Image (cartoon, rainbow, N blue to C red):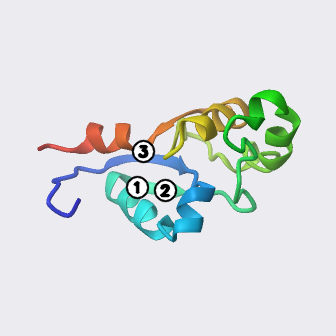
């Protein structure tokens, strides 16, 4: 990734560090990549797991709702996008944050010039 030329956007973005990122010890790399893509990256406090648990969030939506209850209040004014590395997490994050979440690679693609 160091060889990619990235021109960071000047807007705040939310970042969700997935359970997989955390368990594999990749959260610092994911955060570093996001910071190369945006001037302001917000990792919400007290949201360590989205509660979607693969597809359990579809069957048990209250699990997802409970896990993400502190999220919406942490989205700053002027922030309209969030990023993650898990499609299922992004479903719940979008539903409970009030902003659209998508895979971090979309942002990397947006800001890359090569």
Which of the two labelled residues, at mark 3 and mark 2, occupies the earlier sequence position? 2
Question: Which of the labelled discs sits on residue 104, or is there none?
Answer: 3
Give the secondary structure at mark 3: helix
Q: Position of residue 23 (x, y in %)?
A: 59, 66
Question: Which of the labelled discs sits on residue 41, or is there none?
Answer: 2
Relative placement, left or right, of 58 versus 17 is right
Q: Marks 1 and 2: which is nearer the front?
A: 1
Q: Tell me the CA gap for discs 3 and 2.
A: 12 Å
Q: Are marks 3 and 1 in contact (CB under 8 Å)?
A: yes
Q: Are marks 1 and 2 in contact (CB under 8 Å)?
A: yes
Q: Residues within 10 Å of mark 1 (few under 14, many from 20)?
A: many
Q: Residues within 10 Å of mark 3 (few under 14, many from 20)?
A: many
Report the quarter where the N terminus lies. bottom left
Q: Residues within 10 Å of mark 2 (few under 14, many from 20)?
A: many
Q: Residue at x 67, y 41 (%)?
A: 54
Which of the two labelled residues, at mark 3 and mark 1, occupies the earlier sequence position? 1
Q: Tell me the CA gap for discs 3 and 1.
A: 7 Å
Question: Which of the labelled discs sits on residue 34, or is there none?
Answer: 1
Q: Residue at x 49, y 56 (%)?
A: 41
Question: Which of the labelled discs sits on residue 82, or is there none?
Answer: none
Residue 15 lies, with reference to residue 95, above or below; the image says below
Report the quarter where the C terminus lies. top left
Q: Tell me the CA gap for discs 1 and 2.
A: 7 Å
Residue 40 lies, with reference to residue 88, above or below; the image says below
Residue 64 lies, with reference to residue 8, above or below; the image says above
Residue 33 visible:
yes
Residue 43 visible:
no
Which of the two labelled residues, at mark 1 and mark 2, occupies the earlier sequence position? 1
Q: Position of residue 70 (x, y in %)?
A: 79, 50
Relative placement, left or right, of 68 versus 85 is right
């Amino acid at each position: 990734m160091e060889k990619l030329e990235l021109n960071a956007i000047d807007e705040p973005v939310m970042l969700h560090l997935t359970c997989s990122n955390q368990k594999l010890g990749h959260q610092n790399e994911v955060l570093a990549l996001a910071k190369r893509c945006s001037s302001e990256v917000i990792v919400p406090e007290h949201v360590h797991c989205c509660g979607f648990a693969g597809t359990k969030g579809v069957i048990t939506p209250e699990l997802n709702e409970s896990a993400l209850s502190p999220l919406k209040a942490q989205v700053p004014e002027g922030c309209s996008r969030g990023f993650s590395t898990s499609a299922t997490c992004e479903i719940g994050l979008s539903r409970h944050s009030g902003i659209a979440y998508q895979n971090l690679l979309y942002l990397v693609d947006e800001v890359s010039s090569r």
